[in-house]
Amino acid sequence: MIVRGTGECVGTFTDASVEQEAVVRARARLAAPSPESGPEQVRSAELFCEVATPAPELIVFGAGHDAAPVAQLAWAVGFAVTIVDVRQAFLTAERFPGATLVCAHFSQFAEHVNLSAGSFVLIMNHHVERDEECLRFSLESRAAYIGVLGPRSRYDKLLTGLADRGYVPASSRLASVRSPVGLALGAETPQEVAVSILSEVLAIRRGFAGGFLSGSVASLHRPDDKRLLAPS
Amino acid sequence: MIVRGTGECVGTFTDASVEQEAVVRARARLAAPSPESGPEQVRSAELFCEVATPAPELIVFGAGHDAAPVAQLAWAVGFAVTIVDVRQAFLTAERFPGATLVCAHFSQFAEHVNLSAGSFVLIMNHHVERDEECLRFSLESRAAYIGVLGPRSRYDKLLTGLADRGYVPASSRLASVRSPVGLALGAETPQEVAVSILSEVLAIRRGFAGGFLSGSVASLHRPDDKRLLAPS
């Protein structure tokens, strides 16, 4: 049988009590931070839960030269990548292999760009007005991660610009914003910045804090060392 | 004129006192952790120091399936990558584009593999004896970074194996070893592990600690926030 993330079930078991418990177990697996497939024993029935989750989504606003290495690395790591820019000429498959390319002005985002609770968003237009509107759009969505390129002062400026035009986001939404984006690697080139950003995206996705592993005796895959986990 | 990293100079200035000071300035630039080009004013003379440094080196021992994404990412980021394995069939340009491929048994390393103080080394043979001998070879070199794949307990086992055969490394050299290798990203796939490892290599190279940048108000390029710097 199939148990969807929405809770909905398709198909049945011959034993209704096994079915009921199997659905509970399947929902528990789906609710885990990193859902995994595995066997389940429900009384005398031996079951196997195969978890099928969609690829994680990275939506990049801004198709500049520094977006290309981020998109390529994210794609190599297994993300479904979408690039959004108003400049058609920048949106080419050569620069963004494997990515979905969306040519849209910010006034058209509601129609063309879909951000869900599982979306990772990067804002890197190198253009104040576009960055402001992308930030507003992302804050109004449920996106769990909103990375804003540039120093913290630039992010503050974007918020001030939005406030001047009457938009003040809920503080709960501001907690999703990462600025400066990325891990502290001393990254300088666009390729290095891409590694810094993707490292942070992976760490946040799995609930890790991104520091050095060296010296830790915890299991690498199921850490029992809480220092490895990001404070929530 | 040219001022080499060895201190040696080639060429002259017409004004000997300007030359003397120019050489001092050039050597100071070369001695910086991340040498950079830039203008220099020596009395009335306007000079420009152009720094040319070789690409950083990553030497990977072990050409298994998990080495390929590490090598590809390192190459994309600008490293000169060398892959060392005794198994010729694993050393192909398709798997390791841009890399120097060295087919050698560990008894031949002294002849075929050159590790310098600037070398970043990864040990990932998935083979205890080979890992032990690669670790010994790396510890006997001046390599600044020796990353050992796997949990800490495996690294301890390698050291015990070497000790059983009479090799006990200097403790100063053990400080160069990173185990578990990489940053705490919760990496699971080979591609994710590659990002975790490259993040650490970049952070160590530039003297950063790899944690989250978000919230920091320091300059991203020349940090004045010491939290960003790795304790030395």
Image (spheres, coloured by chain):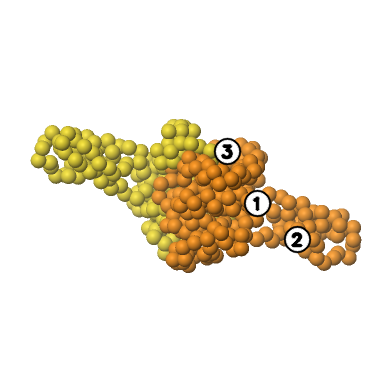
Chain colours: A orange, B yellow
Give B52 or A152, whichever is nearer the viewer.
A152
Q: Which mark is residue A142?
A: 1
Give B14 or B7, whichever is nearer the viewer.
B14
**Quadrant location of the C terminus of chain A in the rendered image:** top right
Say which residue label 3 marks: A216
Residue type at mark 2?
Arg
Residue type at mark 3?
Ser
Mark 3 secondary-structure assignment? loop
Q: Position of residue A117 (x, y in %)?
A: 66, 53
Q: Position of residue B192 (x, y in %)?
A: 55, 53
Say which residue label 2 marks: A4
Which subunit holds the residue at mark 3? A
| Residues flagged by tags 1 and 3 on a common chain | yes
Residue drawn where x is 49% and y is 57% of the image: A62
Residue drawn where x is 53% and y is 50% of the image: A132
Pick out the residue farthest to the left.
Answer: B14
Mark 1 secondary-structure assignment? loop
